[in-house]
Amino acid sequence: MRVGKFIFTKKNKIMNTTITSQTNEKELNAFRELNLAWLEKFFEVEAYDNEVLNNPNKYILEKKGQIFSILYKDEIIGTVALMYNELEELEFTKMAVSEEFQGKGLGKKLMLYVIEKAKEMKVKELILYSNTSLEPAINLYKKVGFIEIDKGETSYQRCNIKMSLDLFLTLN
């Protein structure tokens, strides 16, 4: 099911992308592979990462979460999930864009689309866990309205920041 379409210009390139929420084998494999690529580049893949990436049905879909993919010319070039974590918070998680497509605004487009989907789920708050060494990501999160909150307990060792976006204020 195609759920969103964007055409934008960046550096004199026009990219026609589509966001989908299908969860077929191709998309689940891309979800895993794109996330493993960035995790291996910047950190170590943790046991919990492997659990979620190898069992997205169990950890995301069966718990009423969603996985989104962004396609360009039928190629999956980015992915993200909305997942209810062990604290029953709706978590913006596992966002990854193929390295060759980074810096073109796709992460922001994907994030803004998924925030709208989270609003449709009628939750008050969207949270995320990250690491401050990922400065471009942290800056993006702040630009769209996420604020830093107390980290508390987390399943990720690499996490040194927790952020929250209040969706209640912007619900229609």
Image: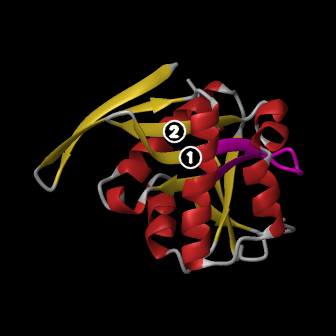
Indicate the position of residue 74 as horizontal and vertical percent values.
38, 33
Indicate the position of residue 41 as horizontal and vertical percent values.
54, 75
Viewer-proximal residue, 162 or 130?
130
Alpha carbon distance from label 1 to label 2 = 8 Å
Indicate the position of residue 26 as horizontal and vertical percent values.
57, 36
Residue wearing tag 1:
30
Residue ID at (76%, 50%) = 54
Secondary structure found at label 1 = helix
- In the rendered view, tell whether residue 39 sits above or below residue 133: above
Indicate the position of residue 59 as horizontal and vertical percent values.
82, 44
Quadrant in which the C terminus appears:
top right
Q: Nearer the viewer, mark 1 or mark 2?
A: 1
> Can residue 6 be seen?
yes
Magenta portion: prevailing SS class: strand
Amino acid type assigned to the residue bearing label 1 in the image = Ala
Amino acid type assigned to the residue bearing label 2 in the image = Ser
- How crowded pointer 1 is (Cα within 10 Å; few <14, some 14-19, many 20+) is rated as some
Residue ID at (43%, 52%) = 107
Q: Earlier in the sequence, mark 1 or mark 2?
A: 1
> Can residue 146 be seen?
no
Residue 69, disc = 2
69 horizontally vs 106: left or right: right
Residue ID at (31%, 35%) = 73
| Image: magenta residue range | 81-94
Secondary structure found at label 2 = strand
93 horizontally vs 1: left or right: right
Assess whether mark 2 and mark 1 are in contact (beta carbons under 8 angstroms): yes
167 horizontally vs 11: left or right: right
Q: How many marks?
A: 2
